Image: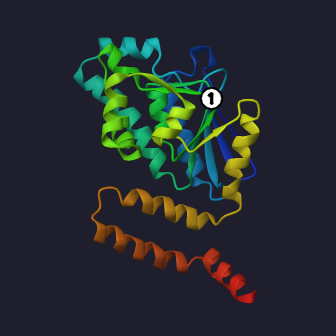
């Protein structure tokens, strides 16, 4: 049985982590199912955005007890393979062409907070809670560090990774980890409204923008500008841009 549920509404694809009895904790099956769903969605040229959410009371509480037990009993190569699997999920989210949105309610902790952070956009309910508590058990929020360091200042990333405290949605917004706080009672509808924006803008332009934004990571100023020139040229030749210019000139 799949550890996730998927559904499409209009041009929005939803992936629901479906282990509510385990607070949607990550295990190998869930991570693999998520990767499969993301790859399938990426092949569908009619989709405009992907939303990842959790069933039940929480978004995702990190690794479950069986996963932690496996870590404690595995050798170096087995643990490397396990860590590699989660890294591939985080990397895949950035490689998927369209926006991937985390809709966080309840708790997003440890690997669950890492999953949310790895998404392109993060929406949070008013009562959502976040945290990277790995250091409390001698662990490191290692793969997500690459993303966290790009989302917040170096000193904030250090604080979050080494102190392991929980924080609320308002604090997460202040840190720059989430895009918008939505009311608990209307959360699902507000998520739909927010994501529906991608049904009204050019898909090719969004795809090119996402690719360019992440391509600029670590690039020099001149290299980033040149990448902008290349993407700008490609965008001009798309049907959406040609039609958009024609409509503007007809006004």
Which residue sits furthest left? Answer: 76
Q: Which residue is mark 1?
A: 105
Q: Is residue 128 above or below residue 145?
A: above
Query: Which image quarter is the N terminus in?
Result: top right
Q: Residue at x 74, y 88 (%)?
A: 250
Give left or right: position of 166 versus 145.
Answer: right
Scheme of colours in the image:
rainbow
Residue 138: percent from left, percent from top? 29, 16
- Using the rendered image of the protein, determine whether residue 60 is visible from the camera's viewpoint: yes
Q: Is residue 141 above or below residue 23?
A: below
Which residue sits furthest bottom? Answer: 250
How many marks the image carries: the answer is 1
- Using the rendered image of the protein, determine whether residue 35 is visible from the camera's viewpoint: no
Q: Is residue 145 above or below residue 215?
A: above
Q: Is residue 81 above or below residue 208?
A: above
Give left or right: position of 210 versus 123.
Answer: left
Residue 205: percent from left, percent from top? 57, 67
Q: Between 217 and 207, which is closer to the camera in this rendering?
A: 217
Q: Residues within 10 Å of mark 1 (few under 14, many from 20)?
A: many
Residue 94: percent from left, percent from top? 45, 49
Q: Residue at x 50, y 51 (%)?
A: 96
């Amino acid at each position: 049985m799949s550890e996730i549920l998927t559904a499409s509404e209009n041009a929005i694809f939803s992936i629901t982590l479906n282990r509510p009895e385990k607070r949607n904790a990550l295990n190998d099956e869930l991570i693999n199912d998520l990767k499969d769903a993301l790859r399938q969605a990426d092949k569908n040229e009619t989709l405009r955005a992907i939303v990842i959410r959790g069933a039940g009371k929480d978004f995702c509480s990190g690794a479950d007890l069986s996963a932690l037990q496996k870590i404690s009993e595995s050798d170096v190569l087995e643990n490397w393979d396990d860590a590699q699997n989660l890294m591939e999920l985080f990397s895949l989210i950035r490689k998927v062409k369209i926006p991937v949105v985390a809709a966080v309610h309840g708790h997003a902790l440890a690997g669950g907070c890492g999953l949310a952070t790895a998404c392109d956009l993060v929406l949070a309910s008013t009562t959502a809670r976040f945290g990277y508590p790995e250091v409390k058990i001698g662990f490191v929020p290692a793969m997500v560090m690459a993303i966290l360091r790009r989302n917040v200042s170096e000193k904030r990333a250090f604080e979050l990774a080494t102190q392991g405290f929980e924080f609320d949605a308002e604090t997460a917004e202040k840190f720059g980890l989430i895009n918008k706080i939505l009311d608990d009672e209307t959360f699902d509808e507000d998520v739909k409204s927010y994501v529906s924006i991608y049904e009204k803008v050019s898909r090719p332009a969004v795809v090119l923008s996402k690719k360019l934004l992440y391509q600029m990571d670590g690039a020099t100023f001149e290299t980033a500008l040149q990448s902008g020139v290349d993407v700008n040229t490609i965008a001009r030749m798309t049907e959406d841009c040609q039609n958009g210019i024609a409509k503007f000139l007809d006004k």
